[in-house]
Image (cartoon, rainbow, N blue to C red):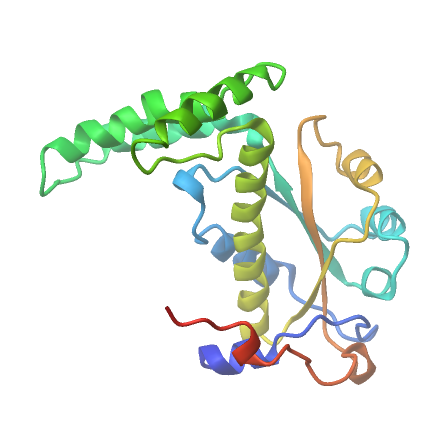
């Protein structure tokens, strides 16, 4: 399928065929392709939990209120935000830049890139009981009187940034699955405490999305896709 066909094929499937299995290795490949998604500062503050065990599937289904999309799923993938790993991921980026032997058109770009992960990322991501975030916000707000500046620097702002990046990876995963004619359903109705317990996640990890996987039954797609008229949401400036 080309991209348009893949986009049209992908639907949120609520009921999967109990007789049809999906290959876990192919699902794993789709998860790997999800890591190619764009993400803020290439920090990659994500983890992916591929659930194939019937026991864990049952636990996660229960945490998703046993909705049909969860109860009939053959596999699931839980997309997890790990903002708490920002130091480790920043160091990985810094190490890559220092050893990649990149040829820059502008020699200054190398120093800018290194300073970005050495100085700016720690400034943006560091926090202390939320207080540091408000101090940063005030300082950046004042600087914004004189020049354009990044303003989303509070703890809550950076949490949103991390979730947006993981959301992009989830969409990439679902499109990769659709290309194989594997079906998915992104579920936001779940008990995050129970899912974290089932997956043995650390306290600071956050659940972004639970995606069920399988092969659709016809009744698993609830009617034609509805979208608000395009001219109500499109603005050419």
Q: Nearer the viewer, residue 41 or 133?
A: 133
Relative vertical location of residue 217 with respect to residue 124 in this rendering, above or below: below
Instruction: Give the mark count.
Output: 0
In the shown orientation, is residue 211 left or right of residue 39? right
Residue at 74% x, 72% y is: 13
Q: Nearer the viewer, residue 180 or 193?
A: 193
Residue 134 position by quadrant: top right
Relative vertical location of residue 230 with respect to residue 66 in this rendering, above or below: below
Where's residue 169, x and y in %? 53, 53
The quadrant the C terminus occupies is bottom left
Residue at 56% x, 31% y is: 83
Residue at 79% x, 40% y is: 192
In the shown orientation, is residue 103 left or right of residue 199? left
Where's residue 183, x and y in %? 67, 71
Q: Nearer the viewer, residue 67 or 164?
A: 164
Residue 19 position by quadrant: bottom right
Q: Is residue 194 visible from the viewing direction of this image?
A: yes
In the shown orientation, is residue 127 left or right of residue 235? right
Residue at 68% x, 66% y is: 184
Q: Nearer the viewer, residue 215 or 68?
A: 68
Relative vertical location of residue 179 with respect to residue 208 in this rendering, above or below: below
Where's residue 56, x and y in %? 81, 46
Where's residue 16, x and y in %? 79, 72
Q: Is residue 91 visible from the viewing direction of this image?
A: no
């Amino acid at each position: 399928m080309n991209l348009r066909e893949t986009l049209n094929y992908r639907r949120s499937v609520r009921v999967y065929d109990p007789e049809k299995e999906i290959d876990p290795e192919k699902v794993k490949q789709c998860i790997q392709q999800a890591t190619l998604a764009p993400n803020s500062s290439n920090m990659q503050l994500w983890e992916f939990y591929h659930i194939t065990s019937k026991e864990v599937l049952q636990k996660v289904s229960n945490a998703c209120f046993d909705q049909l999309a969860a109860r009939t799923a053959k596999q699931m993938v839980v997309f997890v935000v790990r903002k708490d790993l920002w130091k480790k991921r920043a160091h990985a980026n810094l190490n890559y830049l220092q050893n990649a032997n990149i040829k820059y058109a502008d020699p200054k770009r190398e120093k800018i890139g290194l300073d970005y992960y050495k100085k700016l990322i720690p400034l943006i991501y560091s926090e202390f009981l939320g207080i540091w975030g408000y101090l940063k916000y005030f300082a950046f707000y004042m600087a914004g009187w004189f020049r354009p500046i990044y303003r989303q620097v509070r703890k809550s702002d950076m949490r949103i940034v991390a979730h947006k990046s993981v959301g992009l990876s989830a969409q990439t995963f679902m499109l990769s699955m659709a290309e194989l004619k594997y079906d998915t359903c992104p579920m936001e109705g779940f008990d995050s405490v129970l899912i974290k317990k089932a997956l043995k996640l650390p306290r600071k990890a956050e659940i972004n999305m639970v995606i069920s996987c399988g092969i659709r039954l016809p009744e698993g797609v609830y009617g034609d896709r509805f979208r608000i008229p395009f001219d109500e949401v499109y603005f050419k400036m």
